[in-house]
Image (tube, rainbow, N blue to C red):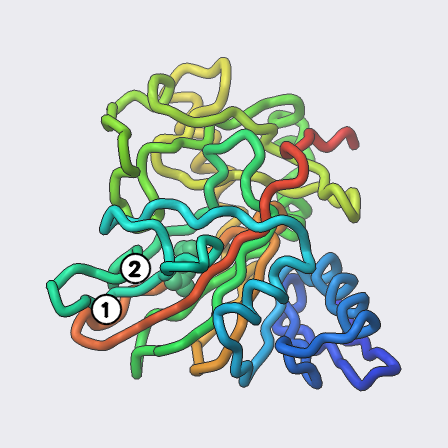
Amino acid sequence: MGIAAFSSDGGLEARPLTPVVGAEIVGVDLGAVSEDQFAFIRDAFDRYAGLLFRGQDLTPERLVAFSRRFGDLDHAPVMENGRTAVPGLPEVYLVSNIKDTDGKEIGSLGAGEAVWHTDMSYLAAPPDISMLHAIEVPPAGGDTWLCGMNAAYNALPPELKRRVEGLRIKHDGTYNSGGYVRQGVTPTDDPRKSPGTYHPVVIAHPNTGQPLLYLGRRRMAHIEGLDLADSEALLDELWAYATREENAYRHSWRVGDVLMWDNRATMHRRDPFDAASRRLMRRTQVKGATQPKAYAG
Ligand code: SIN
């Protein structure tokens, strides 16, 4: 079932980007959002799970102020360069391949592919929302994809829905989506022994009640109670539904774009790009207000 466009009296409009996930919001300056406009954006966010705002000229402080309207923000995690975020703005994280004058990357994730994942779901209460603001973009590549996890759940055959009822998946905390080992973690080959958290395979969205397939990331995942071979086979089956192209929005970046997504209702990935070109995104994350809860049907 498709999702329709809707408009507010204040001139904002939500234009769906695909039939199942994402909408572009037009008519708003994120540096000066009124209460009415924010109510429209909040509602659109629950409806579409991913929102795009083009042409936003925002200081990092204004990005933080807009993000904070959705809830408390996370302190940015330690990046691969060992530094914590932007001096003076602990909520801002840099996703970038750019190097400083000492030859050190100023941000995270380099120029390679970032595989499908939801952010930091190895935690008990992962961030609810992630937001990227494009400051520099490469001439080609580096597109970000979102897939809709309600549509993914709806696509499962009834027999598979029944099979995963009550099951939980271990969301691994060893690797980030760029394949880098997280600070302080010693990798193991056995997903049952790696650090992480078990979450229900199907969760209910806390605001809409919709069922969502909640997969986290494929690498080092494990389905509780199954031996490794059975767990791998079931995970492969589930993943095949989640990341189908008809279930995804592909975003080609322009400077000034803000793309935000709901980490419960979407997964995302990023295409690689030429390491010789520059890409810089400022990122904020809204803290997880609650732990992901199982969908009760
Ligand atoms: C991420 O995977 O969180 C970053 C996505 C991107 O760089 O577009």
Q: Quadrant of the C terminus?
A: top right
**Number of numbered discs:** 2
Q: CA distance from mark 1 to mark 2?
A: 7 Å
Q: Residue at x 79, y 48 (%)?
A: 208
Q: Are marks 1 and 2 in contact (CB under 8 Å)?
A: yes
Return the x and y of residue 271 as percentages of the image width and height: 34, 64
Q: Quadrant of the N terminus?
A: bottom right
Q: Amino acid at mark 2?
A: Gly
Q: Residues within 10 Å of mark 2 (few under 14, many from 20)?
A: many
Return the x and y of residue 145 as percentages of the image width and height: 47, 63
- Place residue 279 in its image quadrant: bottom left
Return the x and y of residue 102 as percentages of the image width and height: 11, 63
Q: Is mark 2 within 8 Å of ligand 1?
A: no
Q: Amino acid at mark 1?
A: Ile
Q: Nearer the viewer, residue 36 or 19?
A: 36
- Above or below, 25 against 294 in this view is below
Q: Residue at x 73, y 68 (%)?
A: 41
Q: Residue at x 35, y 48 (%)?
A: 177
**Residue 64 has which mark?**
none
Residue tagged 1: 98
- Displayed-image quarter of ligand 1: bottom left
Q: Residues within 10 Å of mark 1 (few under 14, many from 20)?
A: many
Position of 131 with respect to 143 (left or right) is: right
Q: Residue at x 65, y 71 (%)?
A: 23
Residue tagged 2: 107
Position of 171 with respect to 294 (left or right) is: left
